[in-house]
Structures are given as structure tokens and as C-alpha cells.
Image: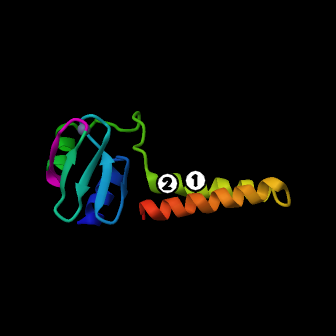
Amino acid sequence: MKLVIASFLKEKKISYYITEETMYFQCLFCYEKAEMDYNTSVWHCNKCAHNGTFFDLMQRLKEQPHQTFDAFKSIYNPKKEIYQIKKQFKLLIIENNKTPTEKKLVQLYNKVLDLIEEINIY
Ligand SMILES: [Zn+2]
């Protein structure tokens, strides 16, 4: 079910990301972040209170096939943000190689890694 939903959202260019138990995607009604249990496909949006199942989503898009999400911002994806933060840290550490700043950056980077692990985003 998870892969079916993911490929559907991808095909429709709807911003989404997946964590261990939940799939987050851009709500078709308010364009904020909605969440779905991908085992049952039941979803709800905390922002506009719309809810339903995966099949309701497909139905909605069938009724409004020209609804496009390109113009709307992507939902905040913590996995992507973490990836970019790590990448930037590594670049900064390389750029500051053998300077006093390098040590501070490495310390900060390790603190960020600890924080990510603590809040258990993965
Ligand atoms: Zn919504």
C-alpha cells in the first residue's frame, strides 16, 4: 500500500515524505501538511480538518484533474532538511580546515547529530 500511495503522489507531483509509520503529504484542500497512516490509507489534515482515505484522494483528483501543485510550496520535509544541513556542515568543516573555527564547527555538527537522534526523525 505504501508504495502504491507513494508512486501515486509522485505521479501527481504532490509533495510528500515518509517516516516509519506515517506518510506526510500536501493537503489537496489547503496545501498544508496532512498525514496518512499508510497501512490503512486513512488520512487527515490538522489545518483544514479534511480527512478520508487514499481512494478519496484519487477521487478528488479525478474530479479536478487540472489541479496543479507546482505553484504551491513543498511541505517542510525534515529528512531533506537534515540531509542539506549535514551537507552544509561538511562543506563548512572542509572550508575551515586547520582553522580555530573548524573545531567549533565539528562540535556544533556533533550536537546537531545528537539532537536529530534524540528527536528520532529517522
Ligand atoms: Zn488541509
Describe residue 108's horizontal placement relative to residue 39 as left or right: right
Q: Which residue is mark 1?
A: 84
Query: Camera-side residue: 49 or 5?
Result: 49
Query: Camera-side residue: 11 or 89?
Result: 89
Describe residue 115's horizontal placement relative to residue 46 as left or right: right
Pointers 1 and 2 in contact (CB under 8 A)? yes
Determine if the magenta segment contains residue 49.
yes
Q: Residues within 10 Å of mark 2 (few under 14, many from 20)?
A: few
Q: Residue at x 29, y 55 (%)?
A: 8
Q: Residues within 10 Å of mark 1 (few under 14, many from 20)?
A: few
Secondary structure, mark 2, is helix
Is 50 drawn above or below residue 80 in the view shown?
above
Residue type marked 2:
Lys
Q: Residue at x 65, y 53 (%)?
A: 88
Is 82 drawn above or below residue 33 in the view shown?
below
Q: Quadrant of the C terminus?
A: bottom left
Determine if the magenta segment contains residue 58.
no
Q: Residue at x 36, y 38 (%)?
A: 69
Extent of the magenta region: 47-55
Where residue 98 sits, quadrant-wise, is bottom right
Q: Which image quarter has ligand 1?
A: top left
Query: Camera-side residue: 1 or 66?
Result: 1
